[in-house]
Image (cartoon, rainbow, N blue to C red):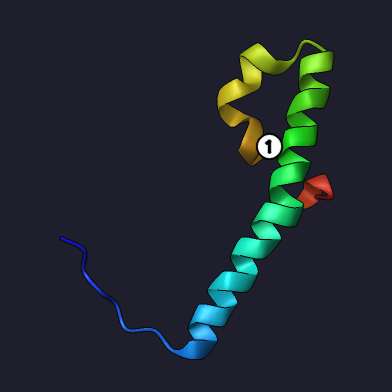
Amino acid sequence: MTDKVPMTLLGYERLEEELRHLKSTERPAVIKAIAEAREHGDLSENASRAPELYRRPDSGT
């Protein structure tokens, strides 16, 4: 069973915008960072931390 949670139109629009941002900006950046790590052979030891490593505010992405 799915519980329904009331949401304002503004709240819905903010979530939609966040989803668009994640899909169009954050996800491609993480994919690119993982590809670069793979090229350098750095993927296996950092695979579990890759998304968090590239989302840190000090990383520039």
Is the residue 55 above or below the residue 38 in the image?
A: below
Residue at 64% x, 12% y: name it: 44
The answer to which quarter of the image holds residue 30 is top right
Task: Give the labeled residue for mark 1.
Answer: 53
Using residue 45 as the reference point, say whether residue 3 is left or right of it. left
Image quadrant occupied by the N terminus? bottom left
- Look at label 1 and name its amino acid: Leu
The answer to which quarter of the image holds residue 47 is top right
Is the residue 2 above or below the residue 59 in the image?
A: below
Is the residue 9 above or below the residue 14 in the image?
A: below
Q: Residue furthest left?
A: 1
* Residue 56 in sight: no
Is the residue 7 above or below the residue 49 in the image?
A: below
Q: Position of residue 22 (x, y in %)?
A: 66, 56
Mark 1 secondary-structure assignment:
helix
Mark 1 crowdedness (10 Å alpha carbons): few <14, some 14-19, many ≥20: some
Q: How many marks?
A: 1
Residue at 62% x, 40% y: name it: 52
Q: Position of residue 54 (x, y in %)?
A: 72, 40
Residue at 50% x, 83% y: name it: 11
Using residue 47 as the reference point, say whether residue 40 is left or right of it. right
Residue at 76% x, 54% y: name it: 25
Q: Position of residue 38 (x, y in %)?
A: 76, 17
The answer to which quarter of the image holds residue 31 is top right
* Residue 24 in sight: yes
